[in-house]
Image (spheres, rainbow, N blue to C red):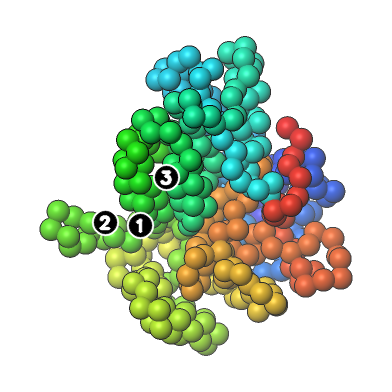
Amino acid sequence: MGRNKDVEKLASIIKDFRKGELDIKLDEAHVEKWLTQFSKESQDVILKETTHIFSELYFNKDDIKEGFLDKVITYLMQKYSPCENVVFVSMQESGHSQRILVDMLEKRVQKKCGFSIQREVTNKSQTIVYLDDGLYTGSTAKKELLSLIKGLPANCSIVVFFMIAHSSSLWHVKNVVIPEARKKNISIEIFPRICLETNKHIPRYDYEHSRFNHQEHLWPSPSLRSIPVFAQYGDCVEEALRSNNSPAIKYVYREGVWDDDEGIFSSVKNRNIVEQEFFLQGLKIYQSMSDPKGNYPLGYNTYASFGFGSFCASDLNIPNTCPLVLWWGNVRKRGDALDNWYPLLPRRTNGMGPCAW
């Protein structure tokens, strides 16, 4: 497939991103404008891999409605009928996608079942549903689920659905939230529609660790240390982790069995090219920020790193855990620091209104 065809395909995938909110058209010219910010020799690879990954991990509104929300409704009707007694909570700020998802689900329930959903938790509530588009670092879900458990009556049930989740965060959230729920005899089920592998180790019966050899996120190879600015940044990350006695210092680079892992990319070679270029351009964005607030070149993270490195999006929004080059910046010049980059998917942030679906 030639460049023009790849550009056309990527534009067709993202064309309805934040539909009704943006004053630009996400067409072929938009994709080209984003691409030309990268080094000339890397552009075709970046285009090919972004199209390849978003073909699987970009969710349009039909994917959300039919591939996710309808499955949620079917499961709840089978296990918790009548669904009129199920409460759907919306706990996040307006910039997040949770409230939009619950609104969309309510329309699907009205269409399929003929009634409106409940949204207010009372001391008589027995089944509570927490719905979200993604689980990334897990910090938001963990905080909100713990708060939800604290305010619920004993002996009820919580059902959690994520459209996409990352295995390391899923494992962590389960290990924190489930024991707290048990203290009140609250049952809790957690279901991701898609789970991407990001766990670096899993406990075994002998408490040793078994490594996975597949990592489905951006995580740079140690071979990139040959680039001085890359090595310098990596040294700073390692020093920050060492000073905090963080176990994450073992996983700064994609070393050992993971070095030859293509992950979600089409090849290891292309993975290394994309990770290198996304980091180099993301570093420039990172250095322009007056206060990064946990943002790193390859996305937001809860500790010092190259970034969380997720690579997914939907018509609703893109997570800030994706590389900065995908979402940071202005699509129109505004005379501020965000003018230094033109984003492929301009992210909705807290305080922005939801899309009109």
Q: Is residue 64 visible?
A: no
Label total for image: 3
The answer to whether residue 338 is left or right of residue 87 is: right
What residue do we see at 86% from left, 70% from top? Answer: 335
Q: Amino acid at mark 3?
A: Cys
> Which residue is the site of mark 3?
195
**Given the current orientation, which residue lies at the most extreme left position?**
206
Q: Which mark is residue 111?
A: none
| Residue 161 pos. (x, y %) | 47, 36
| Residue 289 pos. (x, y %) | 69, 75
CB-based contact (under 8 Å), mark 1 and mark 2: yes
The answer to whether residue 290 is left or right of residue 293 is: right
C-alpha separation, residue under disc 3 versus residue under disc 2? 15 Å
> Quick one: quadrant of the C terminus?
top right
CB-based contact (under 8 Å), mark 3 and mark 2: no
Q: Tell us which disc is closer to us: 3 or 2.
A: 2
What residue do we see at 49% from left, 56% from top? Answer: 139
Q: Amino acid at mark 2?
A: Ile
Q: Secondary structure at mark 3?
A: strand
> Which residue is the site of mark 1?
199
Q: Is residue 326 above or below residue 165?
A: below
Q: Amino acid at mark 1?
A: Asn
| Residue 338 pos. (x, y %) | 76, 68
**Given the current orientation, which residue lies at the most extreme top position?**
114
> Which residue is the site of mark 2?
202
What residue do we see at 35% from left, 78% from top? Answer: 245
